[in-house]
Amino acid sequence: MSTHIPIYASDDPYWIEKGRWLFTQPIQFMQGASSMQTLPPQSVMEVAFIGRSNVGKSSLINAVTNHKSLARVSHTPGRTQELNFFSLSSYGILVDVPGYGFAEAPKKKIAAWNRLIHDYLRGRSSLRRVYALVDSRHGLKANDKELFKVLSEYALSFQVVLTKTDKLKPGELEKVLEKTTQDITLYTPAHPKVLATSSDKKLGLESLQAEIASLVLEGRG
């Protein structure tokens, strides 16, 4: 008698193909939201990208969606100042969340962003998963772990995505993956598989596409 061994969407040829297909569909900027009152209706499933300022979030969004300038890429950390919503055709929504950490803005404005982020994470029932971006060269920092605690308090599923892995020296990625995978076991809502990506070298994008497709197309957790 054979035993079924569950695999993650990123390891499943079916979802890898579905992910490729999803990201060939029309993807467009919907709107920015600076308050809970201006959020779009909750009509389809959403996934959100969040990370420290300068983690490469906009570059990864552009790479995974096969668009050169869908998300605004800036050399100034903290330029994303709203929740930006992008439609994945009619199937789902991808949300670009303002970065945390360093930002060139007044303290009151940063505090307002933080309130908006917390309110969105806590109160958005259509949000299926948060993709927490971490610079592979630096690993988990204190503010990353603080985010993970918040997501755990809200019982929000999240998956860590390592960025800029092409910048690591040979042999370093395996160590970073191992340590990060061990560290996230402290957080109940954390997806057990850490994804490794590079926007510049187009690495790991199909795995991320597959995970997103499994959530917005089938509601698979």
Image: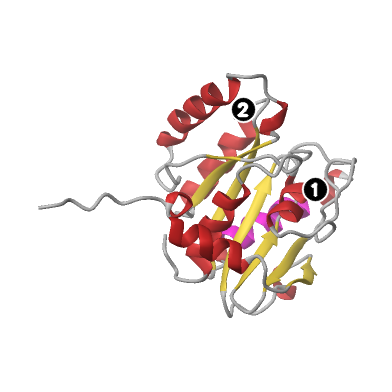
Asked if the magenta segment contains residue 115, the reply would be yes
Kind of element beneath mark 2: loop
Question: In the image, is 8 to the left or to the right of 142?
Answer: left
Up-down relation of residue 171 to residue 61 (above or below): above
Q: Residue 127, position in %: x, y?
A: 55, 65
Question: In the image, is 102 to the left or to the right of 12?
Answer: right
The residue pinned by badge 2 equals 139
- 193 or 99: which is nearer to us? 193
Residue 178 in view, yes or no? yes
Q: Residues within 10 Å of mark 2 (few under 14, many from 20)?
A: some
The residue pinned by badge 1 equals 110
The residue segment tinted magenta is 111-122
Residue 128 in view, yes or no? no
First along the sequence among labels 2 and 1: 1
Q: Residue 100, position in %: x, y?
A: 73, 43
Kind of element beneath mark 1: helix
| Amino acid, disc 1 | Ile
- Residue at the (47%, 49%) spot, across then down: 153
Query: So how many labels did they put on this image?
Result: 2
Asked if the magenta segment contains residue 162, the reply would be no
Q: Residues within 10 Å of mark 1 (few under 14, many from 20)?
A: some
- Residue at the (60%, 45%) spot, across then down: 132
